[in-house]
Amino acid sequence: MAEFQAEPFHVAISAIRERLQSGALPPGARATAVDLADELGLSTTPVREALSRLAGEGLLEDRRGQGYFVQRLGALDIADLYRRSLAHLLIALEPRRSGRLPSQPSTETAGQASEAPFDAVANVEDGFRRWVGATGSRLLVGAFRVVQIQLGPVRRVEARIFSDLDVEARVVLDSGVSRGERLAALRQFHSVRIREADRLALLLEAAGGRPGK
C-alpha cells in the first residue's frame, strides 16, 4: 500500500504556522513563496495559497506589490494578545462546556521519554491547546490557534525576564488542583506578562524578532 502523503497545501500551511510560532519567521520578516517552497520541497503554488490563507487569518500582512510580511508586535499588541489568550482559556474551562479536561503528560516525566529537558514554553502551549481543543468548538480552536501562533516568538523571549518558567509551568499544568486554583494560576500567568509587555516588546525588537538572538 502506498504511503499516505498530505496535500501540498496542508504541508505548506502547517510548516509556515510552525515557523511563525517558533520565531523562525519573526515579526517584521518577509515571507517569500519561492524561498519557502525551496525549504519545503514544494512548488510555489501551494505555498502562495498557504500565504494567502494565513494573511486572511491575520498572521501575515499582504502588502500589495511587496509580498507577505509577518506583523510586528508592539507592547500594546502583546498585552492584547495575552488578554485574548486568557479570555479563550476561560471560555474553554467553563464548567458547562469543558467537562473533564483531557489527560496530559506528567510535568515530571514529559521530557524523559525523549530524554530531553523539560520545555516550559512548549509544554504550556501544548496544554493550552489541549484544553481549547477539548471544547470541540471550531470557532474557539481557530481563534486561539491564531493567538498562540502570534504569541510564539514573544513566549520564546520570556526567559530573559522570568526566571521561574519551569515552576510556573508545573503549577499551571498541575492536574491535581481544583478548578478555582487552575483559574487563579491562569490569571496570574497572563497578568504578569501583560505587566511586562513593554519589556517583552523591546526584547523582541532588539532581537530582530528572533528569540535565539
Image: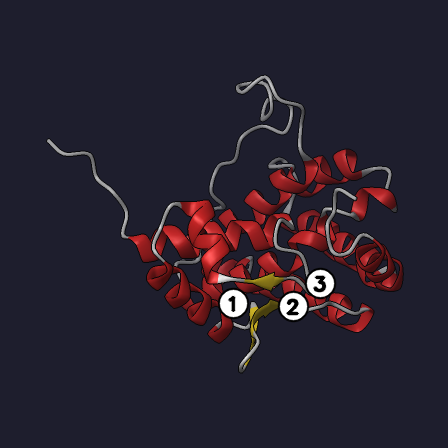
Give the SS element for disc 2: helix
Q: Amino acid at mark 2?
A: Arg
Vertical arrangement, residue 177 with respect to residue 188, above or below: above
Q: Is residue 173 left or right of residue 32?
A: right
The percent position of residue 149, horizontal first and vertical second, equals: 58, 57
The percent position of residue 94, horizontal first and vertical second, equals: 55, 61
Vertical arrangement, residue 171 with respect to residue 8, above or below: above
Q: Quadrant of the N terminus?
A: top left
Label at residue 143: 1
Q: Is residue 37 left or right of residue 202?
A: left
Q: Are marks 1 and 2 in contact (CB under 8 Å)?
A: yes
Q: Are marks 3 and 2 in contact (CB under 8 Å)?
A: yes
Residue at which label 3 appears: 82
Q: Amino acid at mark 1?
A: Ala
User: In the rendered image, is residue 66 in sight?
Assistant: yes
Q: Quadrant of the C terminus?
A: top right
Label at residue 84: 2
- CA gap between label 1 and label 2 equals 9 Å
- CA gap between label 3 and label 2 equals 5 Å
The residue drawn where x is 79% and y is 47% is 158
